[in-house]
Amino acid sequence: MAFTDEQIMIKDMVAKLSRNEILPLSKDADIAGHSSPEIVKLLVENGLLKMALPEEYDGINADYTTIALVVEELAKVDASAAMTVFVTQALINIMKQWANQEQKDRFFKKMFAGDKVNAFSLTEANYGSEAAAIQTKAVLEGDYYTITGNKIFVTNADIADFTLVFVRTGEGKRHKGLSGIIVEKGTPGFRLGKHEDKMGLRGSDLSEMIFEDVKVPKENLLAGPGKGWDILMSGGADMRAYGPGAMAIGLAQGALDYALKYAKERIQFGKPLSELQGIQFMLADMSIQIEAGRSLLYRTTEHMDTNPEEQALRKRLVSSTKCFASDVAMQVTTDAVQILGGYGVMREFPVERMMRDAKMIQIFDGSNQIQRVIVSRSLL
Ligand SMILES: Cc1cc2nc3c(=O)[nH]c(=O)nc-3n(C[C@H](O)[C@H](O)[C@H](O)COP(=O)(O)OP(=O)(O)OC[C@H]3O[C@@H](n4cnc5c(N)ncnc54)[C@H](O)[C@@H]3O)c2cc1C
């Protein structure tokens, strides 16, 4: 795919930022199990949290391909940092698609400085893959919706300024009664619950959100009552390509780069590992899978950028990308650990973190089984 000069410039800038400034901070964030304020500051200073904002709100109106390039470069070094960026861009993209002018003015002006983090809150303790059955309620009383319920597994929850919360507003059964509403940090009755201590992506916060009679202005409802499912199926689905899809390819490339360098330097039986055909074939397979995954990723984002009205192919490509790329990341990071042998499973080397991070991508944002359900439905 031919990238524009601007896209290549941004990609190079993020590659340098990742290697020189983010990498030295990644291991500590992984060990701490929390997002790193220093990394978030770097993302802010480099305009990466506001790149999708329209130009009149001081963004660069980054398209899906540009966001994917940034997410991929970050994930080569630190998939958690990539997670913070893509989830924040996802709410901006959803708002570009679904918010009215008043909402865009109000929220985008608050995001103008580029220091705001966003979150997307759908999952509940009893409803993960079965998102249409969520129970968190929002009842209209005068000028406010009153929200009651609990959400779990919310990425960026601890640092988010704005959260798109999916709620049940109507009597309509399952997906028909759902809506999306924006809740701001500090709204009375809205607080964080348990912070998850997870296997991978440990530098990205994941927490419970508790809503106890939280009054949110009715003007914060996106696109009107009952539009929640449409939001989920459009902008909510789209992020799977430039989010987990791009993260997975970056992560896999980062692991291959590391394993390749190691294989050339590590001497066993009097020669570098890279001269053993068994290792060469592993490296070749890793590279083949990454190239295939990257081609699919940018084929998908190009389709999204150039055919905004087309939906059927878009849906299939997006789910295929998320599923294929994260399966590639799982395989490639596992092989990278294998190539490093005993050193591969030591915390001193980054490939064990990459392998743990890859496992998460097969699960979040719709598990890979759910992506296969979507792809098969689009075929049948
Ligand atoms: C790191 C991380 C970040 C996350 N971030 C967010 C976030 O920001 N916002 C948010 O709302 N949620 C978030 N989640 C939640 C995530 O989207 C869910 O965990 C995911 O959708 C799966 O739901 P579940 O965990 O309830 O598993 P379940 O739905 O209980 O599924 C359990 C297993 O059964 C399989 N399964 C379920 N249904 C089917 C089916 N029909 N056919 C075949 N297999 C099936 C699943 O694939 C899975 O393997 C995050 C999760 C993780 C781990």
Image (tube, rainbow, N blue to C red):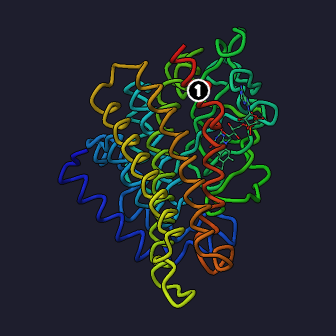
- Density class for disc 1 (Cα within 10 Å; few <14, some 14-19, many ≥20) is many
Type of residue at label 1?
Answer: Gly
Judged from the image, the quadrant occupied by ligand 1 is top right
Instruction: Give the residue furthest to the top.
Output: 172
Callout 1: helix, strand or loop?
Answer: strand
Tell me: 156 left or right of 236: right
- Say if 177 sits above or below 61 in the image: above
Tell me: 218 left or right of 49: right
- Say if 368 sits above or below 341 in the image: above
**Residue placed at 71% from the left, 15% from the top?**
174
| Between 74 and 171, the one nearer to me in the picture | 74
Instruction: Give the residue furthest to the bottom.
Output: 270
Residue 315 picture location, percent across and down: 47, 25
Residue 3 picture location, percent across and down: 23, 48
Residue 286 picture location, percent across and down: 48, 58
Tell me: 222 left or right of 300: right
- Whether label 1 lies within 8 Å of ligand 1 gets the answer no
**Residue placed at 50% from the left, 34% from the top?**
320
**Residue placed at 59% from the left, 39% from the top?**
120
- Say if 68 sits above or below 282 in the image: above
From the image, which quarter does the C terminus lie in?
A: top right
Task: State the image quarter where residue 171 is shown.
Answer: top right
| Between 108 and 21, the one nearer to me in the picture | 21
Residue 338 picture location, percent across and down: 63, 69
| Between 249 and 225, the one nearer to me in the picture | 249
Task: State the image quarter where residue 63 is shown.
Answer: top left
**Which residue carries the number 1 mark?**
180
From the image, which quarter does the N terminus lie in?
A: top left
**Residue placed at 39% from the left, 32% from the top?**
96
- Say if 172 sits above or below 345 in the image: above
